[in-house]
Image (cartoon, rainbow, N blue to C red):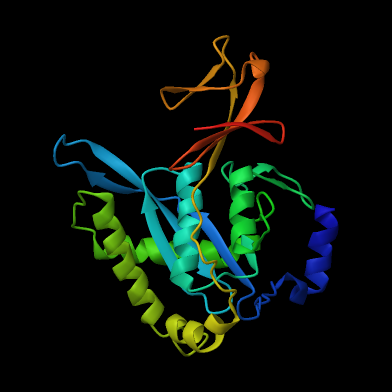
Amino acid sequence: YPNFCKQLHKRYPNLMKASVTLREFSPGERCEVDWAGDKIEWMDVHTGEIHEAHVFIGALGFSQLLFAWAAENEQSVNWLGAHRRMFEAFGGVPHVTVCDCLKTGVSKVHRYDPDLNPGYTEVAVHYGTAVVPARPKHPKDKAIVEGAVKIVMRAFFFTYRKHTFTSLAEINHALSEVIGRINRKRHTRFNISRLARWSEQELAKLKSLPETPFEAVEWREAKVHPDCTVSMEGAYYSVPHVHRSKTVRVKLTVNHIEIFSGLERVAMH
């Protein structure tokens, strides 16, 4: 086969030229999300310890409006909370959300029917968006956010190359300034800024935000102890005695904990 390709390209050299097809999206159709590979370091002024902030990047498909938010880690609570902040910043919800096949979003990778984590499923249902994970090892499936990560992180590190951050709040303030400057800059292909294209053509096409914001949810599994309790976050929560020694699913939110046996809720604290 390599020899066949060699002879084919020798006879038809025009076939060696790569063709580039620009993807076109309708207003409000799509957004793409991902974590940036580069971390932002910040120092705790009280202990002198160096921490790393993980940056969440989101981009709309039509206007390519950008969003960025820094969190202390990439756990499920921050992943879901970043989506809530992103949809609020966009002023609406796109019809399709494309993500990477990360563990906090996709529990089972499949080309046609992937399984989402329960918490991520609740985000999709709450906001009315369809989550479509990109194929593994196919970065072009979410090329917009891949390019957005490079643009945002390059501009951020250049702007604050001589600055030492001391908190996540300071990093997020700096990220909002960088994102605002990029969104207001004239786009080379659109001939207008991302912000203008979003406000004039895409904002009205986005789905409306729900009346109540999404509350971050984390799901875990636990085994009921012989004393009819489960251990979560260093505390013990009681479960009816009929579920002793069984494995149950625990739903953690900011305000309460729910314990499920199958589809039945057996306790709430």
- Corner quadrant of residue 131: bottom right
Describe residue 3's horizontal placement relative to residue 222 as left or right.
Answer: right
Q: Is residue 59 above or below residue 245?
A: below
Outermost residue, top side? 226
Residue at the location (25% across, 46% down)? 42
Residue at screen point 51% across, 68% down: 59
User: What is the quadrant of residue 67 in the picture?
Assistant: bottom left
Give the number of marks: 0
Where does residue 69 sit, x and y in percent of width and height? 39, 58
Q: Is residue 81 above or below residue 87?
A: above
Whether residue 100 is visible here, answered yes or no, is no
Answer whether residue 17 is visible to the viewer in this image: yes
Q: Residue furthest left?
A: 46
Residue 251 location in percent, x, y?
A: 56, 37
Q: Nearer the viewer, residue 257 or 178?
A: 257
Residue 267 location in percent, x, y?
58, 30
Give the vertical position of 240 relative to 68 (above or below): above
Q: Is residue 17 left or right of residue 83?
A: right
Q: Is residue 81 above or below residue 174?
A: above
At 56% from the left edge and 73% from the top edge, which residue is drawn?
208
Residue in front for this viewpoint, 180 or 190:
180
Return the x and y of residue 72 as percentages of the image width and height: 36, 44
